[in-house]
Image: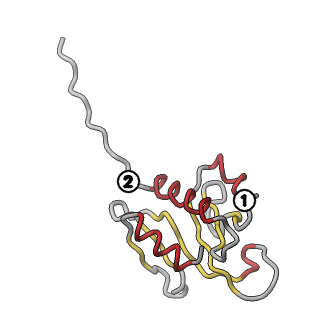
Amino acid sequence: MTRRELERYIFETYPAEDDRPWIEYPQHQVFRHPGNKKWFALAMTLSRDKLGLAGDGFIDAVNLKCDPLLVDAMRREPGFFPAYHMNKTHWITAALDGSADDEKLKFILEMSYDLTKPKTQRKKSPPEAE
């Protein structure tokens, strides 16, 4: 999946807002929930060495929130890396160059969306009459 394909998939699948909050990094794009403004995806253009990849040049990647129980397993998959510049227990980075499996990427994207969505408040039940 490319970055453009990811962006299109996000807007077709989720109610989301995007912005570019850092003037010094205009290529970094945050995707947020409209309700609580929490991020569920951060698309970036990084130098290859930031992900431990050989060679010069840049690569598009996305940070996604992930269940901590799956992070280690996902890092062993092609195209997935320890989170760049985020908490490595709860976030993972996926390359957007076709090396990460599209279905696994969509699975983690959905997980990220669910893990960061606004919490629903339960109505308190009235005390029982005696």
Q: Is residue 87 left or right of residue 52?
A: left
Name the residue type under label 2.
Pro
Task: Decide which of tag 1 and tag 2 comes sooner along the chain.
Answer: 1
Residue at image point 56% right, 56% down? 107
Q: Quadrant of residue 96?
A: bottom right
Residue 65: give x, y in percent of width and height: 56, 58
Judge by depth and name the residue closer to the eye, 96 or 20: 96
Name the residue type under label 1.
Arg
Query: Label 2: which residue?
Result: 118
Q: Which mark is residue 51?
A: none
Judging from the image, the colouring scheme is: secondary structure
Residue at image point 49% right, 82% down? 22
Residue at image point 38% right, 68% down? 16
Judge by depth and name the residue closer to the eye, 35 or 73: 73
Q: Residue 75 carries which label?
A: 1
Q: In this view, does 33 lie above or below 67?
A: below
Q: Quadrant of the N terminus?
A: bottom right
Q: In this view, does 57 lie above or below 90?
A: below
Residue at image point 57% right, 58% down? 108
Q: Quadrant of residue 19?
A: bottom left
Q: Which of marks 1 and 2 is in front?
A: 1
- Determine whether the residue tagged by mark 2 lies in a helix, strand or loop: loop
Q: Which residue lies furthest to the top in this view?
A: 130
Residue 14: give x, y in percent of width and height: 40, 63
Q: Quadrant of the C terminus?
A: top left
Residue 78: give x, y in percent of width and height: 74, 65
How packed mark 1 is, by other alpha carbons closer than 10 Å (few <14, some 14-19, many 20 or more), is: some
- Determine whether the residue tagged by mark 1 lies in a helix, strand or loop: helix
Q: In which quarter of the image is residue 75?
A: bottom right
How packed mark 2 is, by other alpha carbons closer than 10 Å (few <14, some 14-19, many 20 or more), is: some
Inter-mark Cα distance, 1 to 2: 27 Å
CB atoms of marks 1 and 2 within 8 Å: no
